[in-house]
Image (cartoon, helix red, strand yellow):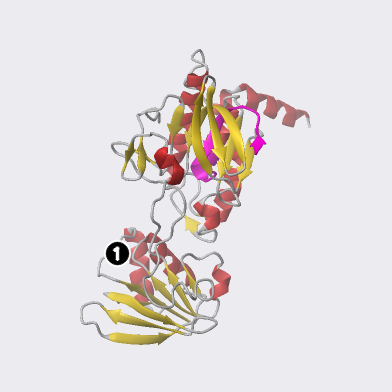
Amino acid sequence: MYEADTKDITIIGGGPTGLFAAFYAGLRGVSARIIDSLPELGGQLSALYPEKYIYDVGGFPQILARDLASNLIEQGLQFGADVRLEEQVQELIRTDDGFILTTNRGRYPTRAVVIAAGKGAFAPRMLECPGYERLLGRGVAYHVKDPAAYEGKRVLLVGGGDSAVDWALNLKDRTERLVLIHRREGFRAHAHSMAQLKAAVEAGEVELLTHREVREIHGEDSVCAVTIFDNRTDEDETLEVDAVVALIGFRPDLGPIAKWGLELERNSIRVSSTMATNIPGVFAAGDIVTYEGKLELIATGFSEAAIAVNYAVHHIDPKARVSPGHSTNLKVFKEREATAGVE
């Protein structure tokens, strides 16, 4: 079991919120460590939709998820935060000096904790039909990792949220045939995306079928067809396809975090306006938290990360100011500018 050195702040989660928290810890001059169960930093940006465009982050009219992740990693690690990947935090042990976080590989002492674990572990919702699990990874998928893999193929997308609509729009020019089905009439996607989808359907670029569900996925070594049915009439229809992508979301699973004695509400951690949990020294930010008026946005996560870190710094040293002031006035950046000017 690896015994690590003590850090001021340990951040659980290496997605956008966790990376910005690491940046802010460095900005405040405290040491930080990121622990994440995934094999790479970036969270869902890297793991689920790296080729998808993000439109609602300040300063970027549009940016690919992988590029946003790359920028966040560069920004977040510039102050030397320690990174531990493919480790799931299991226990939170209170000590006289703070906490010890244990993982499947080591023990990590820390003076404060910021939980930025998104919705917890990725637990994709699966289609409950014959052929789904057997052909998973052989034409069946629950996310789009590489859009080029669908070049010139016949593809069935299943879902009615932002992810399904966005990928229909992103893949329509690559595929030979693209069919999107949803189990009801209404969609849970942004109005602008729905307007684009309507235009694509009218142009014959996307086939849209509502009130449809998957009955069975066919194929031996790979997908060759899928049977869908109209849930109003139970009438079947078989489509020849090369791929089935079920974009029907993920089940929130906090895993061991749920057993730490935190105040929870519907698989989220309840926090105060300072991002403090009910355990002194433990803060949380991002999609994992809930409070009145909460919005689950990357932009919101950035703000929450800054608040959590600033109050964590104050918790560690009550004499430290909560507000660091404007970054343009901070000594660390002025010294960097001066050095760059000399060079």
Position above or below: 326 against 46: above
In percent of width and height, residue 189 lies at 33, 60
Magenta-span inclusion, residue 13: yes
In percent of width and height, residue 196 lies at 37, 67
Position above or below: 258 against 149: above
- Seen from the viewer's position, the closer of residues 89 and 29 is 89
- Residue shown at 41% from the left, 39% from the top: 259
- Inspect this view and state whether residue 210 appears: no
Q: Quadrant of the C terminus?
A: top right
Q: Which span of residues is magenta-colored?
A: 1-19
Amino acid under disc 1: Phe
Residue highlighted by disc 1: 187
Position above or below: 66 against 72: below
- Inspect this view and state whether residue 193 appears: yes
Magenta-span inclusion, residue 255: no
Q: Quadrant of the N terminus?
A: top right
